[in-house]
Amino acid sequence: MSLKHLASTSSADEVAAALAQDGAVIVDNLISVDAVDKVAEELRPWIDATRFGPDDFSGRRTKRTGGLVGRSQGCRDLVMNPLVLATTKKVLSHAMSFQLHLTQVIAIDPGQPAQPIHRDQWAFDFFPFPKGYEVQCNTLWAMTDFTERNGATRVVPGSNHFDDKLQFREQDSVPAEMSKGSVLLYTGAVYHGGGANRSDATRVGINITYNVSWLRQEENQYLSVPLEIAKTLPVELLRLMGYARGAYALGYVDDLRDPIEVVRPDLRHAGLGDEETEKRMRQQAAEFLKA
């Protein structure tokens, strides 16, 4: 079974439906090659300075460069991609809101063996989330062509419906082959892993993931993005990074202040978040008090 490919003109409903069915889908050529090259140029110094991974899971011939919101305008654009955000909103609609979970360049060098096949949601202390309850919606943007030979991410299609803590071999999965500028979307429940790079060139992708706001972020956005940079960012991006309540009583600052005030004091009376989320939060609180 191969992964489904959708056109860049596809709707969020179409992408979300594919994710619900297979746990992963590729949207072809969602950004231009020029945009990819711009991001690569912005990140080159940071990638060059990154060390290889310290263990077999992170990859001893793999570089993982984070902190991308603070380091690259192009990556901020990827984080805020309209189709990705609209899809994530649908996939994680059962939660009050979602947030930015992780930003990371994954550069797999020649000679890197295949990564163990896993679920990303295992990061949450291997908690057994109910089957069908998604807590993550993830993206992997192709900064180079992804081929089976150069280590394209491997996916077990439909495994988002499988039981937890299963073990799979490389041959149980299929490669997410895609062209530069395309993006693989996948859920936290689908089994997957980085492929073995048997080529003579580095395979580079940008992993940007989102999770429900009541769970801790894998990458600490508040410390990864210096405050002086955070103060210059758009409010919508700041809230996505976590400068917002994750639910009615989660994430406020000292005297019930909105977290956005820390970086934007001028928004002191902004409320609990965006208008839609604030309405849902107040409704949730009102319904709880009636119970």
Image (spheres, rainbow, N blue to C red):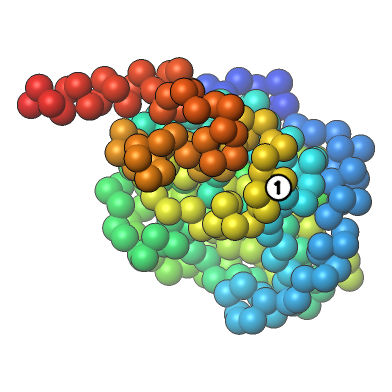
- Depth check: 141 or 268 in front? 268
Graded by Cα atoms within 10 Å as few (under 14), some (14 to 19) or many (20 or more), the crowding at tag 1 reads: few
Q: Position of residue 163 (x, y in %)?
A: 32, 56
Residue drawn at 90 percent across, 45 percent down: 37
Q: How many marks?
A: 1
| Residue receiving disc 1 | 228
Q: Quadrant of residue 138?
A: top right
Residue 53 vs residue 131: left or right? right
Visible residue check, residue 19: no
Instruction: Examine the rendered structure and indicate whether residue 111 appears above or below residue 107.
Output: below
Residue 30 vs residue 56: left or right? right
| Element type at mark 1 | helix
Q: Position of residue 151 (x, y in %)?
A: 73, 63
For this orientation, the residue located farthest to the left is: 291
Visible residue check, residue 34: yes
Residue drawn at 80 percent across, 33 percent down: 31
Residue drawn at 79 percent across, 47 percent down: 72
Mark 1: which amino acid? Glu
Residue 121 vs residue 207: left or right? left
- Depth check: 146 or 95 in front? 95
Quarter of the figure with the C terminus: top left
Q: Position of residue 199 (x, y in %)?
A: 84, 69
